[in-house]
Amino acid sequence: MRIGLALPNYGRDAGLRAMVEVSRSAEDMGYDSLWTGDRLLAPLAPQDAYPGGGVMPSAYRLHMDPLVSLAFATAHTNRVRIGTSTLNALWQPPLVLARQLTTLDVLSGGRLDIGIGLGWLRDEYQSVNVPWKGRGARLEETLDLLETYWTAEVMAHEGNLFEVPPATVDLRPVQRPRPPVLLAAFSSEGLRRVARRADGWLPVAMPLDVLMNLWGIVEREARDAGRDPAALRMALRVNLQLTDEPVTQEEVPFRGTFQQYVDYARAAAEAGVHELFLDPGQTHLSLAERIDLAGRFLEGVRRG
């Protein structure tokens, strides 16, 4: 199982020093990947409840751009892959997004994994004047346009939402025919979209029996769509909520001790999870503590 680490592109430590130190330290430790999340704003009175219940973490009040953060991280690393989990791709025109992503793949030397989600907060859509209704159809057309941008000799697109005249685009990704595209999804239609269109799935940590049952749906849908399920991969986000004392097994991985998270990661590897990345951004750890924890986590999981 590959092991990744979230970059500090949000929260109290988000900034120049933290990005440099975490990027370099993660690569030196032997991490396989670095990831960023995407949050546009933290409404005082959000229209939608925070996923899983509770209140939106206060760390989300400071959130740097995920793609710019990844570009910065690549300038301070040489090997580690970079990815978004997840990028809310519908907040900008897909042609602009295609140029950004392709540029990032070029400047990173072909290290980019593109993780896309629909988001959960309608206030953010409202703020950028993008309709909340019809997000699935908008994502489908966005994926169509990205594919055309990356693979067509002459680019042209005519859809229900976007129209691009025939044009030549010589900017091409290093990874051919394109960077891997992974989708975040939990609904039946979303899981089918992963199976039909994506290179993989971006779930958030949950009990492993539930996780692997959902992965089984993706695999079955992929076979039904005439695709090879073995060609798909899963990159699992684990948001740390550390406790001082062990919690019940039912509470893991939503919260738990450091050792319980290490044990969860080991069990995930045994269950067949392809990649797991740790995000300590919602903890109250200092930057030094965050880096120390990352080192101990990697050592603990790989020792198992």
Image (cartoon, rainbow, N blue to C red):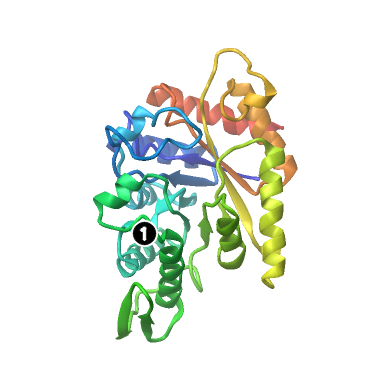
From the viewer's perspective, tell me whether residue 241 is left or right of residue 119: right
Q: Residue furthest top?
A: 245
Name the residue that disc number 1 marks. 90
In the rendered image, the vertical position of residue 84 relative to residue 277, given as above or below:
below
Q: Secondary structure at mark 1?
A: helix
Q: Give me the residue at 64% from left, 60% from top.
A: 232
Q: Nearer the viewer, residue 255 or 49?
A: 49
Q: Residues within 10 Å of mark 1 (few under 14, many from 20)?
A: many
Q: Nearer the viewer, residue 261 or 128?
A: 128
| Residue 199 seen in the current view | no
Where does residue 193 sit, x and y in percent of width and height?
Answer: 56, 62
Where does residue 13 sit, x and y in percent of width and height?
Answer: 33, 30
Name the image quarter holding the C terminus: top right
Where does residue 40 sit, x and y in percent of width and height?
Answer: 30, 45
Q: Give me the residue at 49% from left, 49% from top.
A: 80
Q: How many marks?
A: 1
From the viewer's perspective, tell me whether residue 238 is left or right of residue 262: left
Q: Give me the residue at 25% from left, 54% from top.
A: 128
| Residue 223 seen in the current view | yes
Give the amino acid type for the residue marked by disc 1 in the picture. Answer: Leu
Where does residue 79 sit, x and y in percent of width and height?
Answer: 49, 51
Q: Nearer the viewer, residue 27 or 83?
A: 83
Name the image quarter holding the N terminus: top right
Q: Nearer the viewer, residue 218 or 34?
A: 218
From the viewer's perspective, tell me whether residue 266 is left or right of residue 68: right
Q: Give me the residue at 69% from left, 55% from top.
A: 217
